[in-house]
Structures are given as C-alpha cells and as structure tokens.
Image (cartoon, rainbow, N blue to C red):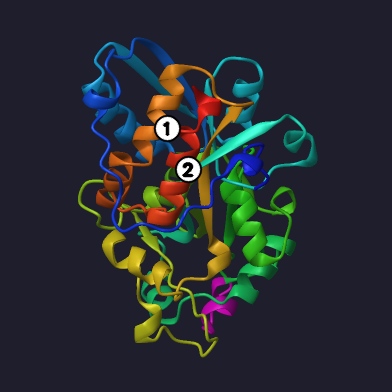
Amino acid sequence: MISGLASLMLFTACRSGIKNNDAKENLPEPLQGELSISGAEALFPLMTVLSSEFMKIHPGLNIRVAKGGTGIGLQNLTNGKADLAMVSRELTPDEESRGLWFFPVTKEGILPVVGKNNPFLAGIMEKGVKRNDLKMLYRYETGMTWGHILSVDSKEPVIPLTRADSSGAAVVWGNYLGIPGTELLGVKVKGDEGMIQMLQNEPLSLGYCNAHYAFDFLTRAVREGVEVIPLDINNNGRIDANEKFFENLCAGSPASYMGKFPVHLCREISLVSLGKPTDRNTIEFLRWIYTDGQKSAAENGYKGLGHCIADDYLDLLNHSVFK
C-alpha cells in the first residue's frame, strides 16, 4: 500500500527483541478523551483486545471500535466520524488520492468454509477443493455440483456465498481466484458473521471468511457449526498430510509462516489515518501497538510484524515530526 509516510521512514538496522516501552515512564500525563476506530472485520477481533488492554493503562481514555468493512471504515475516516480506519485491502485510485497514512498492525488470511451440516462434509475433508473449481464456481456460479467437485455421483448444486459489503476479504478471495472482488458471483451476505450464519442455515453452500471468524477466539478450535475446507493444492484429488494445517488456529499460523498456505490468501492489515496523525491519543496508541501490542497479537493467534518492521514504525512515531 502507498503511504504518505514513506519519505519519513527510518531504515534502521534490525535489532533483536521488541523494544521495552513502559507506558507510565513515557507518558507522564495520563491520556484522556476518546479514540474512534472503524472498518475491516478482519482486524476487529484483535483491535477489541488491543484497545481493552490499552484502556487498562489509561482508564481516562475511551476507545470505541466498530466493524463494517474497509469501505465503511474509510468513509467514516473521511467524514470525520473515526480517528482511524481498519483497512484490509489495496486502495482504489480515489482512496489513494486522499493522503492516507498507513500503520501496519498484523497479517490475516482468508479461508474457504462450509457448514458442519453439509451432506458431503466427509468427502470434502478427504478430497478438499481445487482452486480451479472455486474459480469456475465464483466466475459462472450456475452448473457447479458437489458431484463435480468431489468426483461422485451427485447433482446437488454448490451454492457460493460472497460478501455484499465493501470488504477486503472479497478482494483477497478474488485475487486468489483471478477474479476482481466486485465481480465474484454468489449469494450476497453481509460481514463474516453473516457468512457464518448462512453456511449454518444452507447445507449446500460454500463461502470464505477471515481466519479469526472460522475459529473460536478463546479455544482456538474450529468454530461450532462450520468447517474449514482443506485446499487440494497439488490437485491430486486428495488431501495429503502437508495440506492439513487448519485443524485449529494454532496449527494454521505456522503453516502461513512456512509458505504452505497460498500467499495470495494472506494480506497485511493496517490502521489508517487521514493525513499525519496529530492527536496524542492516536500517536500513543500506535506506539503501544508496536511494542506490547505485538505481544498481544501473537498471543491471540495473529502473525506479528517482525522486529524490524515494528522498530521502524516505532522510530517513525518517535520522530520529531510527531512532536
């Protein structure tokens, strides 16, 4: 993503370990007031945790976090209804022209999912689905059957689900399939929760969602009522041992690090400000994210940014331009 802060980045040597940032020492005066954050559902679960932890340090600060998709977040940011937008996709040319500043927070993947009540679930888990079949399903929608996907004698149709809102998830899913996110065919549903509910209600449906909505945030197990579909990456008609990496959230994260999970299904998720942040609450919250906040991200099943990136952005926020 293109950022207004690129010319100010300090390309420092990578240091070992995350910097120790004692908020009480660095902030002689406690933070007060409100901070509003809106946007991508992919970042919402983590941002609720990070904001809660930061407010414990600064009880006089109220951070409000609302989801609704990247498009809604950017709209609220532009209209002055939010101080920061959660963004999980590349920007449109119009959005790029607004002078936005990006602050990466973590990475998140998109997963194909079905309902637990799908009558073909056993075959799906044994054989998985091929990327080309998914591409045909979301490009043409009609005519695809579960019999075709699983090579069995069945004429039951596959009902594809896609996002109705302006979401980063649809863009990423479309990029993986080679289809623009706005051109994905299927039944339109709103948000990740709407996707999960539709999968539970329609046994023959197939959809996609942000990884942290496919798993229980506390137990790390696959969420009740849904199942993550394994991808038949080598197209051999069965799921091999090295393709089984999403039994739970803990198993999935290392798979993405090691390159087993398709790279096009993962993307960076950022907090975005309209121009250079000037509000002290915003700046200090961002600073905290690049220190103790990175530990919280890892503890909650998200991929950390890595010490070099976190250090670089922390150095940026400590630059005189922010003082």
Which quadrant of the figure has residue 148? bottom right
Rendered location of residue 234, percent (x, y): 53, 86
Rendered location of residue 40, percent (x, y): 52, 37
At a point 40% along the width and 74% down the height, the residue shown is 258
Q: Residues within 10 Å of mark 1 (few under 14, many from 20)?
A: many
Q: Is residue 153 magenta?
A: yes
Q: Callout 1, which amino acid? A: Leu
Which quadrant of the figure has residue 85? top right
Q: Count the numbered circles shown.
A: 2
Mark linked to residue 286: 1
Left or right, residue 114 beside residue 160: left
Depicted 323 relative to depicted 257: above or below:
above
Depicted 218 relative to depicted 84: above or below:
below
Rendered location of residue 307, percent (x, y): 38, 55
Q: Is residue 162 magenta?
A: no
At a point 73% along the width and 35% down the height, the residue shown is 95
Residue 252 visible here: yes
Comparing 200 with 43, the one in front is 43
Marks 1 and 2: in contact by CB < 8 Å? yes
Q: Residues within 10 Å of mark 2 (few under 14, many from 20)?
A: many
Depicted 40 relative to depicted 124: above or below:
above
